[in-house]
Image: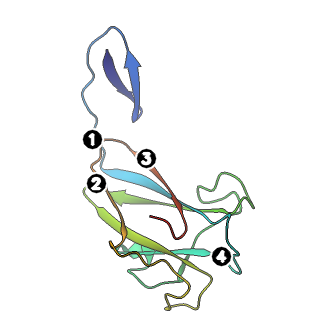
Amino acid sequence: MYIFLVDGTATRRALGTLAQRTKHDSVSVVFQCDARKMYVRKGIYIAGNQDELGNWKPNTVRMFDDGTHGDRQQNDSIWTIEFRFPVGTEIQYKFTNSGPSGEWNPGEEFPGGNRRVFLDGTTDRVVLTDTFGKM
């Protein structure tokens, strides 16, 4: 059994030559936050350690639930935003819910720290699906 990479997607085949791993320069990251079990007054926001994520300033980077910016279905309470980051980037992030700009409340707090992902470049697109308040 061999694994082939075609356009960044792994495919299993019984016969053939093993494909070399493709490295990419940047990776598209889709952040999804499931907020179906909570009241969302204005919107779900993402804050993290990158410029695109507001450099840890909460309630400044609003996510989308309108079928745009990587969001698959409008008004399903799964809030989404998509960005590209360079390969080798470590992303840390949390979500907030409708609070004032610069304030963490209401937001996520985890004893173990932040959500994390490292972009190694073996795929050109990563979809991160999280539930608000659960790690």
Front residue of this view, candidates 61 and 113: 113
The local crowd at label 1, few if under 14, some if 14 to 19, many if 20 or more residues have their Cα within 10 Å, is some
Q: Residue beneath label 4, please?
A: 43
The local crowd at label 3, few if under 14, some if 14 to 19, many if 20 or more residues have their Cα within 10 Å, is many
Q: Earlier in the sequence, mark 4 or mark 3?
A: 4
**As drawn, is 10 to the left or to the right of 23?**
right
Image coords of residue 32 (percent x, y): 55, 59
Q: In which quarter of the image is the C terminus?
A: bottom left
Name, please, the residue furthest toward the right.
75
Give the CA separation, mark 4 to mark 3: 25 Å
Name, please, the residue furthest toward the front.
111
Give the CA separation, mark 1 to mark 2: 9 Å
Give the CA separation, mark 3 to mark 1: 12 Å
Q: What residue type is labelled 3?
A: Arg
Q: Which of marks 1 and 2 is nearer the N terminus?
A: 1
Q: Residue beneath label 3, please?
A: 125
Q: Of circles 4 and 3, which is in front?
A: 4
Q: Quadrant of the N terminus?
A: top left
Q: What residue type is labelled 1?
A: Lys
Image coords of residue 5 (percent x, y): 36, 28
Q: Which amino acid does label 2 sit on?
A: Val
Q: Which image quadrant for residue 53?
A: bottom left
Q: Residue beneath label 2, please?
A: 87
- For the point 44% across and 55% down, which residue is it? 29
Q: Which of marks 3 and 1 is nearer the N terminus?
A: 1
Front residue of this view, candidates 40 and 81: 40
Q: In this view, does 43 lie above or below 24?
A: below
Q: What residue type is labelled 4?
A: Gly
- For the point 53% across and 88% down, which residue is it? 105
Q: Residue beneath label 1, please?
A: 23
Numbered disc 4: secondary structure = loop
